[in-house]
Image (tube, helix red, strand yellow):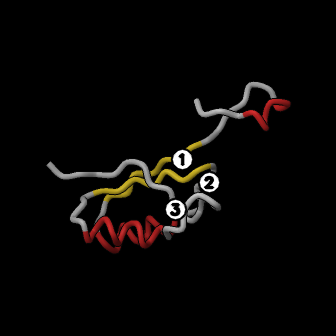
Amino acid sequence: MSFVNLHNITSSSIGFSLIEPDELVTQAKKLNQSAIALTDYSTMGGIYDAYQASQKHKVKLIIGCQFNFVEKIEDAGKSRFR
């Protein structure tokens, strides 16, 4: 059974990670992982670069994203994960 990391944040999530999408996929390939997930925080800006790298290295890309939701806009500063 091979390992696939399903929670990875890249530099597209400003302030949360320094990993470039291409570096993420390249490292997954070096570790013989058949797939890798990209789950940036509140953005999907790294998907294009990660997709290009996944095609180049023949690693399946699993795309996800973390978003915060609030019930009232007045509560936006008090957001929590759901």
Q: Residue at x 32, y 58 (%)?
A: 60
Q: Report which quarter residue 69 is drawn in.
A: top right
Q: Nearer the viewer, mark 2 or mark 3?
A: 3
N-terminal of the pair, mark 2 or mark 3, is 3
Q: Position of residue 35 (x, y in %)?
A: 30, 56
Choose between 18 and 69: the one closer to the eye.
Answer: 18
Q: Residues within 10 Å of mark 2 (few under 14, many from 20)?
A: some
Q: Nearer the viewer, mark 1 or mark 3?
A: 3
Residue that carries the numbered disc 2 in the rendered image: 43
Residue 7 horizontal/vertical position (percent): 42, 49
The CA distance from mark 2 to mark 1 is 7 Å
- Badge 2 element: loop
For this orientation, the residue located farthest to the right is 74
Contact between marks 2 and 3 (CB within 8 A): the answer is no
Residue 59: quadrant of the picture: bottom left
- Name which residue type carries label 1: Cys
| Pointers 2 and 1 in contact (C-beta within 8 Å) | yes
Task: Please state if 71 lies on the left or on the right of 18 as rendered.
Answer: right
In the rendered image, which residue does mark 1 sit on?
Answer: 65
Mark 3 surroundings: few (<14), some (14-19) or many (≥20) residues within 10 A: many
Q: Which three-letter amino acid code belongs to the residue tagged 3?
A: Thr
